Amino acid sequence: MTENNISLVKLDNAGVYKSSKWLVRGVSFEISKGQIVTLIGPNGSGKTSTAKMILNIFQTNEGIVKRNTEKVAYVPQKINIDWTLPLRVVDFMRLTNNISHAQIIESLTLTGVEKLLNNEIRNLSGGEFQRVLIARAIAKDPELLVLDEPVQGVDFNGEIALYNLIKNISDKLNCGILLISHDIHFVMSATDHVICLNGHICCSGTPSAVAKNPAYIKLFGEHTTSTLSLYEHHHDHSHTHDGSISR
Amino acid sequence: MFDDFFIRALIAGIGVAIVTGPLGCMVIWRRLSYFGDTLSHSALLGVTIAYSFSINISLSVFIVSGIIALLLLSLQKRTKLPGDALLGLLSHSTLAVGLVIIGLLTSIRFDLMGLLFGDILSVTIEDIFIIWLGGLIILGVLYFIWKSLFAATVNYDLAAAEGMKPDSSNFIFTILLAGVIAIAIKMIGVLLITGLLLIPAAMARNLSSNPRQMIALSVIGGILSVIIGLFSSLEFNTASGPSIIVAALVLFILSLLPFKRSSALQR
């Protein structure tokens, strides 16, 4: 990891109050260039709200969010494309920027969906659409990349490949990444800083420090730290995304 | 070959259709059809004000519809009424208030049917000028905010996060809608303007596989509807607004027919 301590965003005691309750409050942390920060926590613990504060989608009701970059890319948790809107993958890739065709192909190839270029978004499967979302974010060449459960609905092998890709991107682009993930294995093995949320920050630190923290163990249970073992699918060949075999 | 008034109506109608094409697509994508209805009903109020103070109808309609649009935007944030109930409330209230005021203004003779359903006989050279100039301004502004508006249409959060300023483009788009109603009111009439926004765009959706195609087909559909509608209005002596909308409906129904399209077989 290349941590060069250039701060991309800094939260100081930040919180959001909506529909007469605090979605999340008292959040303080910092994301620097080349760093992967992950948010973990149960449903409704304020992970997405924290991400939305950083992205200026939510205004903070207390505390400060100081962002030092405008080159931001976002992979939201959920997007519904209305049926009435005929939108192809290639149109979607250019949604908030004007990138070249070559760049589009390159990013889609990285996530394994370059063949879907001219398909309509609404005909994609959930996993395919996730891959397109990630490709779109990467193509922007961002300084800060916010990924909200980016591999949901992606098949098992794809999940590992995409997590590897995310790790590579952070090294290659030297961008800061905020990741919201339920995949404890990836969080613990590949990220620099873990923040455990439950309406506020329960504990935070390096993955190994957080894993030993009593607050973390109370939230996630003992088994996640001790008995977690990853099934690895050993192939004597590999598949391209559409299922054809390439050795 | 044709009377002058008919040529004027054709030029005016084609101008309107070029503007309603892209705006209609946006209205469909953003699910604003009822919003458009509310704005166009409020246009009747604008017309009565124009007559009362003898100012230009399009200008008066634009101002009144614009105010109603902004009122709606702020009310939607503040009240607990569901969106459709709020729209229904304002839509029928403004229509009713407009009709009541017309009833009170006994000193002025009104062609009520013309107001509600459009009147091609009434299109003047000045109207053509307003439609084409206003239309060009609307399209120019739309072009300018398109990227931001389109991103916000696909996903608000994404647009906001990536610096596309969706709130300001939403706001400007609402004003543009009021503008298109203002220039279309004489041709189509208060009750049917939303039809010209929606039906060609819905037809275009059936035939297109990307946004640009849908806008182009929507403009073509709108122009065809205006031409066919006006000719039949002349031929059968029917009101211009309903004739244009019926023509649009026929085109829509044709677009549903199962032609063998390569786009449907792709993938």
Image (cartoon, coloured by chain):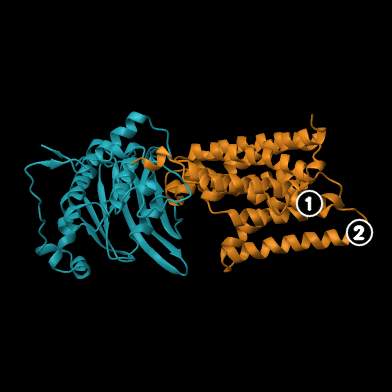
Chain colours: A cyan, B orange
Residue B238 percent across, percent down from the top left: 76, 48
Count up the numbered dots. Answer: 2
Task: Count residues near mark 2 (Cα–Cα under 10 Å), then give few for <14, some for 14-19, many for 20+.
Answer: few
As helix, strand or loop, the secondary structure at mark 2 comes to: loop
The answer for how far apart the CA atoms under marks 2 and 1 are is 16 Å
Query: Are circles 2 and 1 on residues that touch, CB within 8 Å?
Result: no
Q: Which quadrant does the N terminus of chain B fall into?
A: top right
Residue B105 percent across, percent down from the top left: 89, 58
Label 2: chain?
Answer: B
Q: Name the residue under label 2.
A: B106
Q: Sequence-wise, which precedes: disc 2 or disc 1?
A: 2
Q: Is residue B143 left or right of residue A25?
A: right
Q: Mark 1 points at which residue?
A: B115
Q: Which quadrant does the C terminus of chain B fall into?
A: top left
Q: Residue at 87% of width from left, 47% of height from top?
A: B54
Q: Nearer the viewer, residue B92 or B205?
A: B205
Q: Is residue B92 left or right of residue A11?
A: right
Amino acid carrying mark 1 in the image: Leu
Residue B133 percent across, percent down from the top left: 71, 34
Name, please, the residue furthest toward the right. B107
Q: Is residue B100 left or right of residue B178?
A: right
Q: Nearer the viewer, residue B20 or A42?
A: B20
Residue A114 percent across, percent down from the top left: 29, 37
**Foreground tag (2 vs 1):** 1
Task: Count residues near mark 1 (Cα–Cα under 10 Å), then give few for <14, some for 14-19, many for 20+.
Answer: many
Q: Residue at 79% of width from left, 32% of height from top?
A: B2
Amino acid carrying mark 2 in the image: Thr
Q: Which of A186 and A18 is in front in this view?
A: A186
The answer to whether residue B165 shows anywhere in this view is no
